[in-house]
Image (cartoon, rainbow, N blue to C red):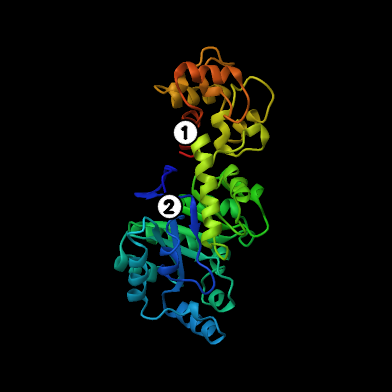
């Protein structure tokens, strides 16, 4: 993969904004290895890792679902991880636990070479009765304790949830981020990108969007409303993955910021503040600033601080005297384009710089 999407999670560099999510019957490293040309994260599992969840796995296995029952857990996990390592794909292990101690023990065994995904997604009744899967969405205090336990162990933590099950997904996302979770992997079910936007506007956590995202058009909608990555399960065949990644690479070559949001005035999420004008006229910017308790002058100061020492500090002949306030590259603007030409900045570079502005603004907002 030639395109650098500039994605990182903790100390791990991710080569592609596409992940493979674990799915029924597909749990092994070989599946990930064979699709490694296209993906950045390979999620295997879910693995039952303690007495209660193993007992639940046995019940489910007796019902014909053998993938829920791991044998020789640690040895098997090491074998599967070894199949993925060396491919450039970062391995993620999806885990079903009924107690924090089992997660801590596993982290001690496997270390920080993998990402640990807490499964708060499984809806198999035996797993729920074992205080795992969706049970955790109804008992967020336990889920938060699991996140904190793994963070104490010094590893990167993902949480897989199913939208619409918890009492308040927005509040849950905030709590998980504050507890130290690095990734929120969301099965959006039928909720769509507007639901995703609400979560993005509530937290800077790294978001993986999941469920029926099997075309670039669908992936782009998720990217434009807050997703950092998308994940596929049953449709993660090489042809679909290749088509997705080829389109993402082409877009990135032309436009830079691979998951750029829509502009705020067109329904964009919080990241789109990078494209906003000065707050001098009635528009969606003013109520957004009020929502985050930012005064107009504070916003101006934040923007100018974010572009200080960069080419976007320039642009005397633009509407507000700086490229800091200029719009997305896909919006026609002769003043912006003239300023970019004068500065010797390509549009793709301009968008990458806007991405950096966005990251700085979010760091201030969610400090």
Visible in this render: residue 31? yes
Residue 171 coordinates in the image, percent (x, y)? 57, 51
Q: Secondary structure at mark 2?
A: loop
Residue 29 coordinates in the image, percent (x, y)? 41, 68
User: Nearest the camera: 162 or 243?
Assistant: 243
The residue located at (53%, 14%) in the rendering is 321
Query: In the shown orientation, is residue 205 left or right of residue 197?
Result: left
State which quadrant residue 268 falls in: top right
Q: Which residue is mark 2?
A: 180
Query: In the shown orientation, is residue 274 left or right of residue 81?
Result: right
**Mark 2: few, some, or many residues within 10 Å (few <14, many ≥20)?**
some
Discs 2/1, front: 1
Residue 148 coordinates in the image, percent (x, y)? 41, 58
Reply above or below: 244 against 100.
above
The residue located at (50%, 34%) in the rendering is 358
Count of numbered circles on the image = 2
**Mark 1: few, some, or many residues within 10 Å (few <14, many ≥20)?**
some
Query: In the shown orientation, is residue 181 left or right of residue 137?
Result: left
- Quadrant for the C terminus, please: top left
The residue located at (49%, 39%) in the rendering is 366
Residue 169 coordinates in the image, percent (x, y)? 60, 55
**Identity of the residue furthest to the front in this view:** 239
Q: Which residue is mark 1?
A: 352
Q: Secondary structure at mark 1?
A: helix
**Identity of the residue furthest to the top in this view:** 317
Visible in this render: residue 365? no
Reply above or below: 295 against 167.
above
């Amino acid at each position: 993969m030639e395109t650098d999407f500039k994605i990182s999670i903790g100390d791990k560099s991710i080569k592609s904004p596409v992940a493979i999510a674990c799915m029924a019957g597909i749990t092994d490293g070989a599946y990930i290895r064979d699709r490694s040309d296209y993906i950045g994260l390979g999620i295997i599992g879910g693995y039952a890792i303690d007495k209660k969840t193993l007992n639940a796995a046995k019940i489910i296995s007796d019902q014909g679902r053998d993938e829920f029952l791991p044998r020789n857990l640690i040895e098997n996990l090491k074998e599967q991880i070894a199949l993925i390592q060396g491919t450039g794909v970062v391995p993620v292990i999806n885990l079903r636990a009924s107690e924090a101690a089992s997660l801590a023990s596993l982290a001690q065994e496997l270390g920080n070479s993998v990402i640990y995904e807490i499964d708060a997604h499984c809806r198999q009744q035996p797993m729920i009765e074992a205080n795992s899967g969706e049970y955790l969405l109804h008992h967020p205090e336990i889920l938060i304790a699991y996140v904190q336990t793994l963070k104490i162990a010094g590893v990167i933590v993902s949480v897989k949830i199913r939208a619409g099950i918890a009492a308040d997904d927005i509040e849950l996302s905030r709590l998980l981020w504050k507890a130290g979770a690095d990734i929120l992997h969301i099965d959006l079910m039928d909720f769509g990108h507007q639901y995703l936007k609400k979560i993005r506007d509530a937290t800077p956590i790294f978001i993986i969007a999941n469920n029926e995202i099997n075309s670039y058009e669908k992936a782009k909608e998720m990217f434009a409303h807050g997703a950092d990555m998308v994940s596929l399960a049953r449709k993660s065949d090489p042809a679909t993955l290749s088509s997705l990644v080829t389109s993402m690479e082409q877009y990135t070559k032309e436009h830079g910021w691979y998951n750029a949001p829509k502009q705020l005035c067109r329904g964009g999420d919080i990241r789109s503040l990078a494209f906003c004008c000065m707050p001098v006229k009635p528009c969606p910017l003013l109520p957004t600033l009020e929502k985050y308790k930012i005064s107009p002058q504070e916003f101006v100061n934040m923007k100018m601080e974010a572009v200080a020492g960069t080419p976007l500090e320039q642009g005397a002949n633009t509407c507000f005297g700086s490229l800091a306030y200029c719009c997305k590259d896909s919006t026609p603007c002769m003043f912006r384009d003239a300023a970019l030409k004068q500065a010797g900045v390509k549009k793709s570079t301009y968008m990458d710089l806007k991405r950096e502005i966005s990251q700085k603004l979010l760091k201030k907002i969610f400090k």
